[in-house]
Amino acid sequence: MFTVLEVKPLKARLLNSGLVLTVLVAMAASPVLAQSTKTGERVMIPTLQSSDKELGVQAAEAIRSQLQKQTNVRDLVVVPKADINNSLASSGYSTTEALAPGDAKALATLVRAPQYLEGTVTKTPTGYKIDSRMIISRDMNKAQVLPSAQGAKLDDAASQVARAIQDARRQLPAEETCHNDVAQGKYQEAVAAARKGLADNPKANILGVCLAEAYNSLKMPDSVIAAAERVRATDPRNTPALRMLAETYRAKNDTPKLLEVLGALAAADPTNIRLIQDVVNEYAKMGHAQDAIPLVRDLLQNNPGDPALLNLAWLVYLNAKDYQGAIDVGNEMVRVDTAAATADYYTRLAAAYGALNQSGRTQPVRRCHQHLEPGKGGRR
């Protein structure tokens, strides 16, 4: 049901610019890669989100430096800053701004990094704080939330993140086995691989999601709930776990739990328009349109003048019987998109005025309605 908002892939722009060859040549010339043909997997640390652009760049470089110090190139290769910047600059992207999720995934795939970091860095009264997640490149929704890192110096916080990345990567061999087994329809084997890995690393959420997926394929709803709720307990923003919980609670007709999970899902990624639309539609189907009003209000505030979102909000306000809200949104909707001023729209608008006992406003609306009726030259 739920789909993640897609961002125009950076990879496509790089392909169009003919930069792929340049990037590959740069990687081949990298002194780190030249040391040995037997190197570990690559991990990418792009610029972190920050209100201070320089701090986001500095934090990323500090994490790269600490990770290189703590690991051996035969076990792990940190994608050099030069490779990242060359790719970004040659395709017209800023080298000092954090990437959108879709672009970060595309860049990680291009530089052959199976994992990459997403995070924010802030200054605190006592130093610095870094909140981050390690994401696997084959599916940017699969992530391991890392412990919040704080330190008097930026390097102190960066060192904690570097250690957390190594800890998070311990689950990857078991997760890859589980993922491949699920893809091949070997669901029992996937469960066994995931449970074995979780026995040594119970907070391994990427692996925990794979376990829930295997149970889902085996049609074991209670086990899906147990596995997904365990992931949710340590990562409330884990959208794959939340999606599976929503689907399972819906199938079990557990309305209170479904409403709870839908709220968590909306809060997990509030800028994802498609996801919020799905949650709003779900609320409406369940007869809980009132719960959707704060979501559509935020959508309109963040995306003013979007005709599709205005239409969604119009319907939500009507279903919630918030008639004044419906009138306000409806007037804006037809101002932005005159094609929305149909006979059905005016019928609903007149009813909204009537519900508010504003009979003086219904007559002009009815005249517009009559003008648009079939056979009178108007739109249906």
Image: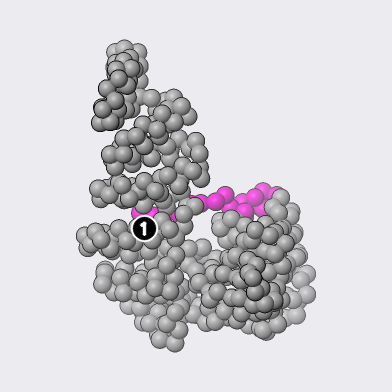
Residue 245: within the magenta?
no
Q: Answer few, some or many: residues within 10 Å of disc 1's Cα (few below 14, many 20 plus, some between 14 and 19).
A: some
Relative horizontal placement of residue 229, taking residue 302 as reference (left or right): left
Please say whether residue 158 is visible from this viewpoint. Answer: no
Q: What colour-coding does the image apply?
A: one colour
Residue 16 coordinates in the image, percent (x, y): 67, 48
Q: Quadrant of residue 21?
A: bottom right
Q: Please state, as top left, top right, bottom left or bottom right, where the N terminus lies in the image.
A: bottom left
Q: Amino acid at mark 1?
A: Gly
Q: Nearer the viewer, residue 185 or 136?
A: 136
Q: Residue at x 61, y 71 (%)?
A: 129
- Relative to 276, is 117 above or below? below
Residue 63 coordinates in the image, percent (x, y): 67, 74
Q: Residue at x 62, y 54 (%)?
A: 10
Q: Residue at x 41, y 64 (%)?
A: 240
Magenta-colored span: 1-20
- Residue at the extreme bottom of the image, as rendered: 200
Residue 7: within the magenta?
yes
- Relative to 156, is 328 above or below? above
Please say whether residue 366 is visible from this viewpoint. Answer: yes
Q: Nearer the viewer, residue 31 or 123?
A: 123
Residue 280 coordinates in the image, percent (x, y): 35, 48
- Relative to 166, is 251 above or below? above
Which residue has dot 1 on it?
263
